[in-house]
Image (cartoon, rainbow, N blue to C red):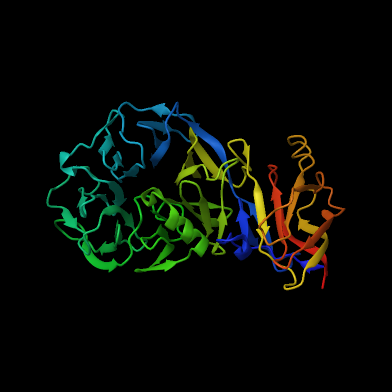
Amino acid sequence: MTDVPFPLLSAPGLKPQTAGGRVLNCYPEKLPATAGKPYGWFRVPGLGLFGTAPSGRYRGGVQKDNLFYGVFGTSVYSFSILGGAGTLLPGSIPGIGIVFAARNNAANADVVFVSPGDGAFWINGGGAVVAYPDPNVGQPNSVVFHRGFFIFTYGNGVTRASGVNVTSINTLDVATAESKPDTLYRPVPLGNGQLALCGSSTIEVWGGQNDSGYPFSYIATIPRGIVGPAAIAGAEDGFGKGLFLVGDDFRVSRLDGYACTPISNSDLDTLIEREPIKTAIRVGVFVSRGHGFVSVQGATWCYVFDTTLSTWHERNSWLKNYWRGLYPIQAHGKWMCGDSDSATLCEISANIRYELGTPIRMRIETGPFGSFPQAVRINAIELYLTKGASDATGHDPDETDAEIAISISRNGGQDWSNPRNVKMGQQAITNGRVRAAIWGQAEVQGVRWRFEESAGLDFAFMGADQLQDVLR
């Protein structure tokens, strides 16, 4: 038997024969040293219904006390910890793109929204969404709360601060990021108390605290910009795994001190480079089963970085080439996100094995392997997985008698066979073998296998063995 090399990260390659394998809608986890295999591949966390709005795409939100305020379309809705239908707030926020939201530490905390290009907004004492109370705010393109201040940024490189835990703005509390004449997209707090002013060509680090004027002073310039306003994440409450960004070099990097360390592979770099509207690329973060996940999304693709093993997997939704999740955020003790296909607020959880009722199809594709330059005859494939993982009380028959779909490519990935469905055992029935025989002859380019499972079960792949004869 030949051990089938399961990939730890997704690397489809520019051509099928250069692929290193694919990991789709699942991720590897290191198993204990005494386990049967070193890694298991588990399904990505699902999306469950938490809250709804009548219409509109989710654009962002923030929690204040026991309410989460989410922007759907041009309307703001509040959601209690119980979720359900949101409560509409009077007023509106124009625009269709991302909304940045922040709250301060006042006794009755102020909640502020900024819609880039449309201005700043505020929830007043009566619970209505109105224009920001101080007109000196101008037309910012982002806001964040940092060390007592609302920090606003502007496309011309200007940054402005409110007073401490108030909305009032002194026109002298202003500074300019001037390392380069680039667009300033947004401010992002750093874990050491400093502030990153993120532009299209540079990131300026500001810190300290001044007694008058703009509260922080220039410290250093990082010679790396971000491709758009949503292209950096990691400062969100509850994450704590670092800052991650899509830079102006069209790579994904982790911010290590004042340096950007690239972490993406060439397949993802190519997707970023080919993305027609790079300012729309989104980076989001969330945590599940102790893993920190960093999602990087374009219009028709999504890669996710696992900070635990430093590996990449792909993610998409059922019958789509993109992931439906929008702008993850921690609120009400959960990780939540919007849904690109409905006016829904979702909970992200490994306990949920569907996406709003639709399946999450796990897929593992191996890279090509064999006995180059000799052809091989493939006699059988046997899978090592969590047998008996079916659910006797689940949906019949896909959950009560679950199957694995197995496909083969005998020419290095250029063409794939029709899948064969192999049962993995009804609930608690762990004897027997998950095996399929007689797969034909593979060319010298090598064999590639594809394994798929889409039933909503607590399931994991752990490996496979191939029985083969080397041919002359």
How many discs mark residues in the rendered view?
0
Q: Is residue 370 left or right of residue 236?
A: right
Quarter holding residue 5: bottom right
Where's the C terminus, which quadrant? bottom right
Q: Is residue 314 left or right of residue 437?
A: left
Q: Residue at x 30, y 60 (%)?
A: 196
In the image shown, does 59 or 404 lie closer to the viewer?
Answer: 404
Where's the N terminus, which quadrant? bottom right
Q: Is residue 472 left or right of residue 277?
A: right
Q: Residue furthest right?
A: 432
Q: Is residue 250 left or right of residue 40?
A: left
Residue 199's spot in the image, x, y percent? 29, 57
Quarter holding residue 133: top left
Quarter holding residue 53: top left
Q: Residue at x 29, y 52 (%)?
A: 185
The answer to whether residue 64 of the structure is visible from this angle is: no
Q: Using the image, determine if residue 340 lies above or below residue 379.
A: above
Residue 343's spot in the image, x, y percent? 47, 32
Q: Residue at x 65, y 49 (%)?
A: 362
In the image shown, does 99 or 407 lie closer to the viewer?
Answer: 407
Residue 150's spot in the image, x, y percent? 26, 48
Residue 193's spot in the image, x, y percent? 32, 61
Q: Using the image, determine if residue 309 lies above or below residue 127.
A: below
The answer to whether residue 122 of the structure is visible from this angle is: yes
Q: Residue at x 83, y 55 (%)?
A: 435
Q: Residue furthest left?
A: 172
In the image shown, does 25 or 212 lie closer to the viewer?
Answer: 25
